[in-house]
Image (cartoon, rainbow, N blue to C red):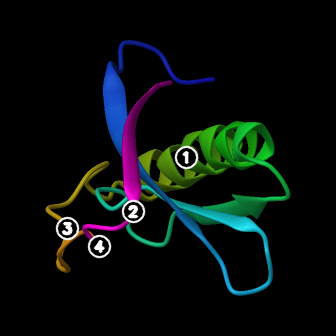
Amino acid sequence: MLKNLDRVKVVLKNGEDGYILAECPSIPGCRSQGKTRAEAITNIREAAELCLDVRRGEGWPLFEEPHTPIDPRADVIELEL
């Protein structure tokens, strides 16, 4: 479990298949989905914690500047880890 981290931005948007897609742009490769918004948020929280555990173990920077702009139609929330 992570400690001493505040919040990360999460981008939520509707997928073509009806699922809610979730991504943490500041954590490379950190994506998930859910059938509902609540499930997507639960899943992205777990994915973010796992991604950061791996990055920490490999000695990589935990966060990076996002390389792509956020879709203005997406919903952006802050997630506490």
In the image, 13: left or right of 68? right
Residue most toward the top?
A: 4
Residue 64 percent coordinates (x, y): 20, 60
Question: Disc 2, disc 4: CB below 8 Å?
Answer: yes
Three-letter code for the amino acid on which mark 3 is drawn: Pro
In the image, 2: left or right of 15? left
* Quarter of the figure with residue 46: top right
Per the image, label 1 sits on a secondary structure element best described as helix
Per the image, label 4 sits on a secondary structure element best described as loop
Q: CA distance from mark 2 to mark 4?
A: 5 Å
Residue at left 38%, top 68%? 28
Question: Which residue is labeled 3 in the image?
Answer: 66
State which region is magenta: 71-81
Residue 56 in the magenta stretch? The answer is no
Question: Which residue is labeled 4 in the image?
Answer: 71
Q: Is residue 74 above or below residue 61?
A: below
- Which of the two discs, 1 and 4, sits closer to the camera? 4
Three-letter code for the amino acid on which mark 2 is drawn: Ala
Q: CA distance from mark 3 to mark 4?
A: 12 Å
Q: Is residue 13 above or below residue 2?
A: below
Residue 21 percent coordinates (x, y): 62, 66
Residue 72 percent coordinates (x, y): 25, 67
Question: Which residue is labeled 1 in the image?
Answer: 48
Question: Which residue is labeled 2 in the image?
Answer: 74
Q: CA distance from mark 1 to mark 3?
A: 15 Å
* Of the image marks 3 and 2, the number of the one nearer the N terminus: 3
Is the residue marked by circle 1 packed among few (<14), some (14-19), or many (20+) residues within 10 Å?
many
Three-letter code for the amino acid on which mark 4 is drawn: Asp
- Which of the two discs, 3 and 4, sits closer to the camera? 4
Image disc number at residue 4: none
Count every numbered label the image shows and give the total: 4
